[in-house]
Image (spheres, helix red, strand yellow):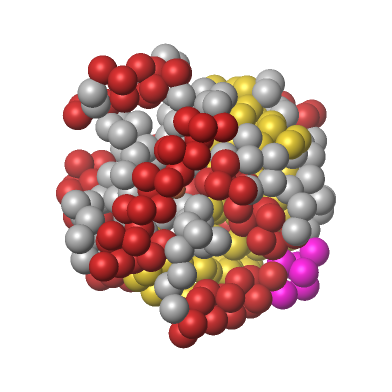
Amino acid sequence: MTAALLSMSHSPLLDHVDPGPEVAAAVTGAFDQARSFVRDFDPDLIVNFGPDHYNGFFYELMPTVCIGYDAVSIGDYGSQAGPLNVPTETARELAGFVLDQGLDTAVSLRMEVDHGAVQPLELMFGDIAAQPVIPIFLNCVAPPFSPVQRIRLLGRAIGSFFARSDQRVLFLASGGLSHDPPVPRIATATPEQREFLLGGGRHLTAAARDERQQRVISTARDFAAGTAAIKDLAPEWDRALMDILASGDLTPLDAWTPDWMTEVAGNSSHEVRTWIAAYAALGAVGEYAVTYSFYRPIREYIAGFGVTTATLTG
Ligand SMILES: O=C(O)/C=C/c1cccc(O)c1O
Ligand SMILES: [Fe+2]
């Protein structure tokens, strides 16, 4: 087999808040680079590490990890709705392999995914069903979080599974980096928010969906203006993470505790788990080098916004 990696921040605000022409052009340029990388690599299969934002997974039953045997996008923030093209048998074999390695995963026979999983697919391929994709949900918003080491080991196990495959596999990570969007939290939830987090937020009416999204959009505008009550982005933390991922030795990340990550880089900084898993997966296949790296802290997108690509060197 051969493998490659694309990691990218996502933001549902891409089409909703204008960061100005210079930043918009820089982000478009990063997406163009990523697109041409993916086109050149020409994957047979995408292993898509993505978070969820209380659209498919809720506190009524919140897994740490879930492998989708099938998946449907709910289409939030104007993202493409509908089924993904999931190779069910490969997903089933992967889940069995992960469990056999002594690691835990839940499985879903009908995973519901949101912008966190599909935005890179749409941006890179134009259609979420264009390519075979195995969606791997990682809990990145709902404490308690697993130690980062578990995510590294999970990624490594997933990489070893595909190391014996004859397919060209793209490990795709969607999320991060430092950011703190206004997602309700169980520790501080009002009774209505608690009900939402427990599962009431599933399949919102159009009006409720619009209200939810408008709140995030207006927070992004306030954040850019310096008036939002959310944690600031943490560019130094973002760059430190990117350096460790590029080094090929991810073990220093084992010391990153979930509480520290939240404190320094925001409640949604745990989305970097998708990057850690994807890099660990690539590292299990062979030595790698980062071939492209983009980073900007972009308040209009409420995101430390990164895009990287990596290929095997051996
Ligand atoms: O609306 C949500 O639940 C999340 C929005 C958001 C905003 C900025 C960056 C992200 O990664 C997000 O998921
Ligand atoms: Fe997100």
The answer to whether residue 270 is left or right of residue 56 is left
Q: Residue at x 58, y 69 (%)?
A: 310
Question: Magenta stretch mostly in which secondary structure?
Answer: helix
Residue drawn where x is 22% and y is 52% of the image: 230
**Quarter of the image that includes the N terminus:** bottom right
Q: Which residue is pictured at 26% across the width and 17% down the height? A: 191
* Residues shaded magenta: 36-42
Is 245 situated above or below 64?
A: below
Q: How many marks?
A: 0
The image quadrant that residue 110 belongs to is top right
User: Residue lying farthest bottom?
Assistant: 22
Residue at the location (37% across, 45% down)? 215
- Quadrant holding the C terminus: bottom right
Percent x, y for residue 185? 28, 32
Give the percent coordinates (x, y) of residue 28.
Answer: 58, 76
The vertical placement of 181 against 2, above or below, is above
Camera sees residue 39: yes
Vertical placement of residue 310 versus 68, above or below = below
Give the left or right position of residue 144, taking residue 88 as reference.
left
Is residue 222 or residue 142 the one in the foreground? 222
